[in-house]
Image: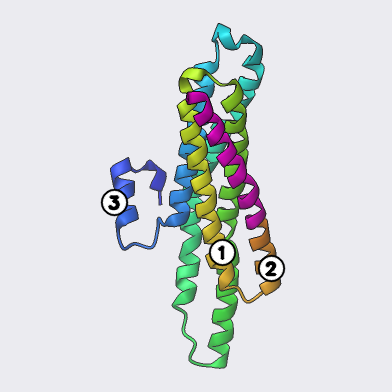
Amino acid sequence: MDLTDKTCRQFIARLSSKEPVPGGGSASALAGAAGAALGSMVSNLTLGKKKYADVQEDINRIRDKATSLQESLLSLVEKDAEAFAPLAEAYTLPKNNQEEMQAKALAMEEALRAASVAPIEIMENCCEAIDLHEELAEIGSSVALSDVGVGVLLCKAALIGASLNVSINCKSMADRSFAENLKGTAKRMMEKYSEKADACYLRVAEKLE
């Protein structure tokens, strides 16, 4: 689909159209990528500064990880959109007889599971990015402290947005045990890292007062 090769205006125009993709999952991944990118930026602004000489090794590590996460999240913009196609197709399958109903149910279940992979990965990436912002709030350049706050809030928004995609897919799954396990995984990440993101934001706000 090459969604990430579009200009900002093209992406937003596509997002606002009646086309089913990109949707909330891709938007969440893009927000997460922007959040991780701000972590990279803060790291780059901290590297090479005498004031932060004693944390250069940590900043290098954070920068490299943040760069990796932003690339991963950009790839998930596409992955989430691509996973929706089989699901959309499964919804349109006929169910005029028992055989067709069984075939549709099987296709739906497979598609719903596949469509849940990207949102979970988005959440995992955002959790890691929030951890990085937590570190940057303490050792990153003070001139870019507000960017840490923006970055962690974007990652939190992406985390919660992706969790909604997990929930809506799980709601339609026939295998309730699998669905509940997946929802539990998402809920644990959301609860732990929403709290971490809030604490990081408050720490930044406190330092900027």
- Label 2, residues with CA under 10 Å away: few <14, some 14-19, many ≥20: few
| Residue 25 picture location, percent across and down | 48, 55
Q: Nearer the viewer, residue 161 or 142?
A: 142
Above-or-below relation of 171 to 72? below
Q: Amino acid at mark 2?
A: Phe
Which residue is the extreme one toward the top?
50
Q: Which residue is mark 1?
A: 167
Q: Amino acid at mark 1?
A: Ser
Disc 1 on helix, strand or loop?
helix
Q: Nearer the viewer, residue 19 or 55?
A: 55
Q: Which residue is mark 3?
A: 13
Disc 3 on helix, strand or loop?
helix
Determine the CA span between mark 3 and mark 1. Answer: 26 Å
Residue stretch rendered in magenta on the structure: 186-209
Which residue is the extreme one toward the bottom?
97
| Residue 17 picture location, percent across and down | 30, 59
Label 3 vs label 1, nearer the camera: 1
Determine the CA span between mark 2 and mark 1. Answer: 12 Å
Q: Residue at x 38, y 42 (%)?
A: 5
Q: Which residue is mark 2?
A: 178
